[in-house]
Image (cartoon, coloured by chain):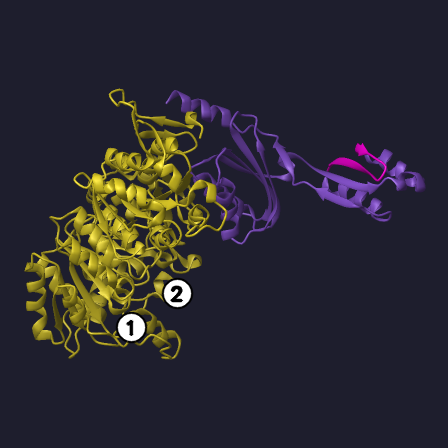
Amino acid sequence: MNTETIKKEENKSAKTERISGSEAIIRCLIAEGVDILYGYPGGAIMPVYDELFKYQDRIHHVLTRHEQGAAHAAQGYARISGKVGVAMATSGPGATNLITGIADAQIDSTPIVCITGQVPSHLLGTDAFQETDIVGISTPVTKWNAQVTKASEIPEVMAKAFYIAKSGRPGPVLVDITKDAQFEEFDFKYEKCTAVRSYNPIPKTDINQVKAAAELINNAKKPMIVWGQGVILGKAEEELIAVVEKSGVPAAWTILGASAIPTSHPLNIGMVGMHGNYAPNKLTNECDVLIAIGMRFDDRVTGSLDTYAKQAKVIHFDIDPAEINKNVKADVAVLGNSKESLALLLSELNANTHDSWLQEFKDLYAIEYDAVIKGDLLPEKEGLTMGEVLKEINTHSKGNAAIVSDVGQHQMIACRYAEFNLSKSNITSGGLGTMGFALPAAIGAKMAEPDREVVAIIGDGGYQMNIQELGTIFQQKVPVKIVVLNNEFLGMVRQWQQLFFDKRYASTEMTNPDFVTIAKGYYIDAKRVTKREELADAVKEMIASDASYFLEVCVEKEDNVFPMIPSGASVSDVRLS
Amino acid sequence: MSQEIKTFTISVYTENNIGLLNRISAIFQRRHINIESLTTSQSEIKDVNRFVIVVKITEEQAIKVVGQIEKQVEAIRAYYHTNEETIFTESCMFKIKSDLLFEEPQIQNIIKDSDSRIVTVNKEFFVLEKSGRRFEIEELREKFEAYGIMQFVRSGRIAVTKDEMKVSELLEDFKKL
């Protein structure tokens, strides 16, 4: 590696010490502030685990029950804390099992570093036992990856890995280390990476673009903000609230942007996208200026691009130049870190209000309330709804819980109805839509922020995709709360089958085991609720518990999630039934 | 923006690291874009490689692909250019039976007129090298084909641009950090 291509933090006090590659890996992790990592041992990573054993007072290794669980736990850790999550696995199947989590982290911009063991360098390319080309396999789903075959390369590659994972638009990095490099001794010294020559993580914000944006906003009659995770990743929550309050612009959020502004804020007008709120979807096609902040116009947000906000001037704030004009053409593009660009915007904005425009959102909310929300939250039918479970969780957690949801109907309900007082509270697999995400991600989230209430909300399908992580919860005594909303269906697919495939329920019906018995098998307190009158007390008991707790709620089998923008339809064609 | 499919030359300046070829080619594969040719070599800057990639796409696609390439950590800069904006050439080699030089007098005239160069001659075969535009190479190949070609190979396009790339300045700025 050419050392002139990166800049390092000078560390004059650091002495050079002769240690093994494995010990160096642990020392690099400690130097980067890693206190917890998730992983699974195996042949090609054993020297590192041997060192972990010696360092267990300084770095806590969590043995998950599957490497996919380790990757998602690292994601949950990163999403709630803003720090880099770390997962470790052996070569071959260990490494390939990380891939789903890595792909999820890539599309949701989550900073994680994955360390994989590799067969000794002299066996590379020989189809050796548990050899797989993990660098090749992970290339399209990593922000950066590298293979290390010499111990002396470890400090620089690890420093680069952490720097790249967390800087700019964050993402996953994989470092593959051959077993001989783990054993080899060398003169170790660690210096953090501060810059990479070919990499410009934060493009400079052009004040003229900020001024152009401010002018559009100041003159707008019907402006609307849609913010995404870029606000949370840029730690720009305060700046966003200040911009919203000064300009009086109604603000909606994407799934990954949820919780950056509290749910109760009067200018928070709800979620956009396929199962988002009626008003912000409808009015996307009525606004005169659309201000997109740290979001990427995903197809689940925009519906058909041909009919998306065509009447509006579009202002796009983003840290990633490749997002500008990728899906929606921007009239004004403001590059840079959201914290800085929103602070600059704030000083250019006029104080304003948009009361009659805001009233349009409220009027449409009233329509959505009558058609959908009332029935979800205050049902009069016999069967339990997913919405009323969320309502109870809001009540008993007082809106302070971090909600970790899986993928499907329950996820949409969780995102729609969870009340968030605090940022980084909605942890879910957005871009990749990874069933099985929530249980391990909740472990990572709870371990990163033990003082926060962490409630995993999972469907009966996704729960069984990583149910083995109950073992991790039991062994590590992670006081995470697990709610399974059981409708005995792969509910979202069933909903689509009902709406678009003439109710042909192909392979979506689930014959489920006794989930309560399974949880109890792991010595986790568990309860099943089948009746409305049991729900409030059960949720209360769960939230009050100091230990991990499993709650199964048997909900109506064939409920649908509305509103809904059918795939490929326009946002203004959002359906209420 | 024009939706017309045109030939674009994409030039990428990169660090010289293992795996980057895979990372860059995957960007095309993922969008179902066929790479017409791809050449990589040392650039004018020490330790900096240059990829020259030829694709037939729309300008909108070219802009997006260049954006995705630049997003790669080890890609320094990427550009797209039309044929008119570049000076480009390809190179090829013919391996032909030496007997033909004596049996077919016309062969010698073809060689003379073709602006090509004899690399080696021995009793069995001779090797001819020619650089130029694709149509010139194709013309020559068709002429030889009548007499029989033992082997033929053609390189991908190499190209320099008429305008400046300013990559050196970018790298100088890094040194000042």
User: Chain A rendered in what hue?
Assistant: yellow
Residue A210: name its quadrant. Answer: top left
Task: Give, as a three-letter code, the residue at label 1.
Answer: Ser
| Viewer-closest of A303 and B108 | B108
The dot on residue A567 is: 2
Mark 1, secondary structure of its residue: loop
Seen in the image, is A202 located left or right of residue A475? right
Residue located 27% across and 20% down the image: A12
| Residue appearing at x 47%, y 41% in the figure | A122
Q: Secondary structure at mark 2?
A: loop
Q: Which residues, given as a range, are shown in magenta?
A: B116-132
Nearer to us in this view, B70 or A247: B70
Q: Nearer the viewer, residue A82 or A573?
A: A82
Image x and y of residue A72, in percent: 28, 53
Mark 1: few/some/many CA within 10 Å (<14, 14-19, 20+): few
Residue placed under numbered mark 1 in the picture:
A577
